[in-house]
């Protein structure tokens, strides 16, 4: 029996939703490594056997049953006397379905605890699929009374206080907490509050990896009962931390100082989130690589750089698709970007398909003025070609629209919106510029792309343009991006009223126009590819507005 000390392995790993056997193999792998390091117990992130989030997959009884069978097999394997396991899975009990964590030791399931506080906001809808568990008591493990609140159970005080009052000595918390750029500090401050309230040491184990729009950033940590930081694992990386617990003279458990990794700044974290989200979407869905149109503009250039950082240059295919309005400057910039990244690069002119469509439509369009419809034939011809290359060779099309464009509908359905995934979907245009400049000056640890200037500076400094007509710039159709992005941030992330936005110095006319464009573009966004969540409120999982919507704010 362990009485005065024990060793914990905190596994920050990347499960795949639905890959029950693959996730179980990860459990075995890390248990073996933990045994070699003398660990007594191994802690995994929330719902690790199943992956997270499960959405409606968890409503399939055969899936829940398969998770249980795998858990029972893992439990039997702990009869070897090695480390115990704390591992999560969906658990059916009669008519109830719980988000559960199981303690496996001595060849059996020694205990089960159920999540009490089910999140039902933003990207979460757990109340729709899970039942809330009762307030839990501690689980006894080899002489230590462990409190095991699950993720959201620690974002309020009730569950942790209940565990402390019923005799828990240490809090071990499995989490699946997705990234946004304000989350790291928010988590830390809230968990410090739980330590202050309970007086117990606290271990936060978070999932890492991409799952559709969500990216889980890891950043697992441990706090002593005096709030001191005992361990900090890195963001966006798979790793395991080892913690030694010993009792002090007052019989309180103390965590000996362990690894503390510095957290990246916001720019680096955003970049790594976009890269990891794209990497896991491509790899977990079995695509051999990606293909994208490289226009000579900043959006496609940053997406190409992210793709190379995620997958390596040999899995990225860039194609320039010029037409009569494509400038020599754009052709030169696209080639320079492709060369800097070392990717496969082809040029496919689109004059023949565009003019073929124009000829085909000439009878129907007779007597009308040429305009946006004809311009969009260029974009849609490019979309058809990229999808054909994807269809022929299997590579997924990366679509490259930023959040500013997605907000106001400055994008063409079945044209530049074609694709399987968008790494910059939740980055405003001004943020795309800042991140591009940042990447040219930094080479993040773990990326597969080259160091140095990967996005030619001329792409960053020149005026943005869709090049669908002569001398076109984005500002012919939109406010300046610093104005547009500030108004959009107010409308989307903050849900401010027109009066509140006007006080920031914007004209009523411009605010009304942006609001109108935002609302009428909802039908386009419903058909857009998924993309990485970066901000507090992304389009899709966070912000679900009706397509048919006549509300407009008024002074």
Image (cartoon, helix red, strand yellow):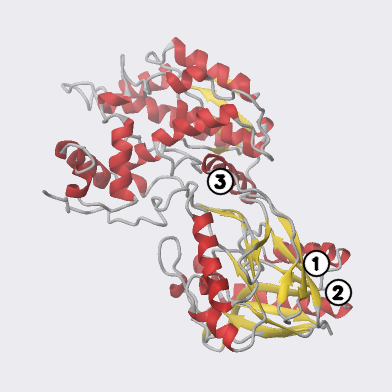
Verify CB contact (< 8 Å) between mark 2 and mark 1: yes
Task: Give whichever of discs 1 and 3 has the lower sequence position.
Answer: 1
Q: Quadrant of residue 323?
A: top left
Q: Position of residue 368 (x, y in %)?
A: 17, 23
The residue at which mark 3 appears reads as 273
Q: Position of residue 80 (x, y in %)?
A: 88, 77
Please tell me whether residue 417 is drawn above or below residue 78 in the rendered image: above
Q: Quadrant of residue 245?
A: bottom right
Q: Position of residue 210 (x, y in %)?
A: 58, 52
Q: Is residue 480 left or right of residue 499?
A: right
For this orientation, the residue located farthest to the left is 555
The residue at which mark 1 appears reads as 31
SS class, disc 2: loop
Residue at (56% x, 21% y) in the render: 337
Q: Is residue 238 left or right of residue 96?
A: right
Q: Residues within 10 Å of mark 2 (few under 14, many from 20)?
A: some
Q: In this rendered view, identify the residue nearer to me: 278 or 429.
A: 429
Task: Give whichever of discs 2 and 3 has the lower sequence position.
Answer: 2
Residue 82 numbered mark, or none: 2
Task: Give whichever of discs 2 and 1 has the lower sequence position.
Answer: 1
């Amino acid at each position: 029996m362990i009485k005065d000390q024990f060793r914990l392995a905190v596994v920050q790993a990347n499960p795949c939703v639905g890959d029950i056997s693959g996730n179980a193999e990860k459990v075995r792998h890390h248990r073996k490594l933990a045994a070699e390091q003398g660990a007594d117990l191994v802690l995994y992130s929330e719902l690790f056997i199943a992956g997270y989030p499960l959405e409606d997959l968890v409503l399939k009884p055969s899936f829940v049953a398969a998770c249980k069978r795998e858990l029972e097999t893992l439990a039997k394997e702990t009869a070897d006397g090695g480390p115990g396991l704390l591992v999560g899975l969906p658990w059916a009990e009669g008519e109830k379905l719980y988000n559960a964590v199981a303690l496996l030791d001595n060849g059996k399931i020694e205990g089960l605890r159920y999540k009490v506080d089910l999140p039902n906001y933003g990207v979460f809808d757990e109340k729709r699929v899970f039942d809330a568990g009762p307030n839990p008591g501690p689980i006894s493990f080899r002489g230590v009374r462990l409190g095991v609140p699950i993720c959201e159970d620690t974002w309020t005080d009730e569950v942790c206080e209940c565990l402390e009052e019923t005799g828990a000595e240490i809090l071990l918390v499995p989490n699946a907490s997705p990234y946004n750029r304000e989350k790291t500090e928010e988590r830390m401050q809230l968990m410090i509050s739980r330590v202050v309230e309970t007086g117990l040491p606290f271990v936060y184990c978070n999932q890492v990896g991409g799952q559709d729009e969500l990216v889980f950033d890891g950043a697992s940590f441990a706090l002593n009962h005096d709030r001191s930081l005992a361990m900090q694992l890195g963001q966006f990386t798979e790793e395991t931390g080892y913690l030694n617990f010993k009792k002090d003279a007052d019989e309180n458990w103390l965590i000996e100082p362990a690894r503390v990794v510095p957290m990246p700044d916001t720019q680096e974290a955003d970049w790594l989130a976009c890269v990891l989200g794209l990497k896991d979407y491509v790899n977990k869905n079995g695509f051999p690589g990606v293909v994208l149109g490289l226009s000579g503009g900043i959006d496609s250039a940053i997406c190409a750089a992210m793709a190379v950082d995620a997958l390596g240059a040999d899995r990225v295919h860039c194609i320039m698709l010029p037409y009569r309005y494509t400038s020599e400057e754009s052709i030169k910039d696209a080639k320079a970007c492709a060369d800097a990244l070392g990717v496969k690069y082809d040029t496919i002119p689109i004059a023949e398909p565009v003019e073929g469509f124009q000829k085909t439509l000439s009878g129907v369009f007779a007597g009308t003025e040429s305009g946006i419809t004809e311009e969009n034939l260029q974009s849609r011809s490019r979309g058809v070609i990229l999808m054909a290359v994807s269809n022929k060779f299997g590579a997924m099309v990366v679509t490259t629209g930023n959040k500013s464009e997605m907000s106001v509908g400055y994008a063409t359905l079945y044209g530049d919106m074609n694709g399987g995934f968008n790494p910059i979907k939740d980055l405003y245009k001004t943020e795309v510029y800042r991140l591009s400049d940042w990447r040219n000056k930094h080479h993040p640890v773990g990326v597969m792309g080259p160091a140095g200037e990967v996005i030619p500076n001329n792409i960053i400094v020149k005026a943005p343009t869709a090049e669908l007509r002569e001398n076109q710039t984005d500002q012919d159709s939109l406010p300046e991006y610093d104005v547009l992005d500030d108004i959009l941030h107010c409308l989307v992330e903050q849900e401010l009223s027109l009066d509140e936005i006007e006080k920031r110095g914007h004209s009523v006319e411009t605010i009304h126009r942006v609001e109108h464009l935002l609302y009428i573009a909802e039908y386009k966004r419903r058909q857009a590819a998924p993309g990485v969540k970066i901000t507090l409120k992304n389009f899709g999982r966070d912000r679900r507005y009706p397509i048919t919507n006549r509300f407009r704010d008024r002074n």
